[in-house]
Image (cartoon, rainbow, N blue to C red):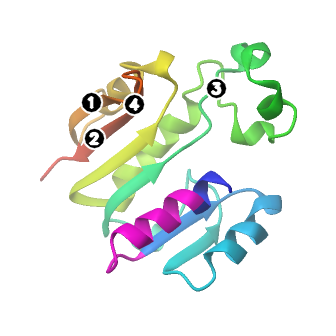
């Protein structure tokens, strides 16, 4: 199952009174995303995470993202089952793998209400770099990396600062 579907459906299930919005860019994936979200409280939008959901600006409590984060220079090291079958847009994000994460920082800042939190997955080799993206921009607090079950830094969080 596609990452967006898993994350959005899990959020809706775990937080019963939540309103969950998912954003999918791929034309190929959107039909399956919508089909799998039928009957749930997940509203699926086709669009780009870089300018998604302007109608929700300043109203969101939590932004969760599992963006592409593989550096273009790492193409040869990606598992063949992913590299040869997944669309490049789902895997790669610029020379350092952080291009879309930089855009999501801006999107999350726009969408979140003060005190809202962003959670973003990244490669274990990018530990320290992703929290820095949030730390170097104004309006964020408590940016930190967090380990996965193998104790490798695999996701970062940041809180939108209070005015």
Of callouts 3 and 4, the N-terminal one: 3
Q: CA distance from mark 3 to mark 4?
A: 20 Å
Residue 13 in magenta? Answer: yes
Residue 53 shows up from this direction: no
**111 vs 120: above or below:** below
Position of 105 with respect to 134 (left or right) is: right
- Which of 99/8 is in front? 8
* Magenta span of residues: 6-19
**116 vs 73: above or below:** below
Q: Residue at x 65, y 62 (%)?
A: 47
- Marks 3 and 1: CB-CB under 8 Å? no
Residue 25 shows up from this direction: yes
Label 4: how many Cα within 10 Å (few below 14, some 14–19, many 20+): few
Residue 156, by quadrant, is top left
Of callouts 4 and 1, the N-terminal one: 1
Which mark, residue 70?
3
**Which secondary structure lies at badge 3?**
loop
Q: CA distance from mark 1 to mark 2?
A: 7 Å
- Which of 9/54 is in front? 9
Which residue in the protein does label 1 denote?
A: 144
In which quadrant will I find the N terminus?
bottom right
Q: Residue at x 70, y 35 (%)?
A: 91
Which mark, residue 158?
2
Q: CA distance from mark 2 to mark 3?
A: 21 Å
**Which secondary structure lies at badge 2?**
strand
Q: CA distance from mark 2 to mark 4?
A: 20 Å
Name the residue at the right extreme.
Answer: 84
Percent position of residue 85, x then y: 86, 39
């Amino acid at each position: 199952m596609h990452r967006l579907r898993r994350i959005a459906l899990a959020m809706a299930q775990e937080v019963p009174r939540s309103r969950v919005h998912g954003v999918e860019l791929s034309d190929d994936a959107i039909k399956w995303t919508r089909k799998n979200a039928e009957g749930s409280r997940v509203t699926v939008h086709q669009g780009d995470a870089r300018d998604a959901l302007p109608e929700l600006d300043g109203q969101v409590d939590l932004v969760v993202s599992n963006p592409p984060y593989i550096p273009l220079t790492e193409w040869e090291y990606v598992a063949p089952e992913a590299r040869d079958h997944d669309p490049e847009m789902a895997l790669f994000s610029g020379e350092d793998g952080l291009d879309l994460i930089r855009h999501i920082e801006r999107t999350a800042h726009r969408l979140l209400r003060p005190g809202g939190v962003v959670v973003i997955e990244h490669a274990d080799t990018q530990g320290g770099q992703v929290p820095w993206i949030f730390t170097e921009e104004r309006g964020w607090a408590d940016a930190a990396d967090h380990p996965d079950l193998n104790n490798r830094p695999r996701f970062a969080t940041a809180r939108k600062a209070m005015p």
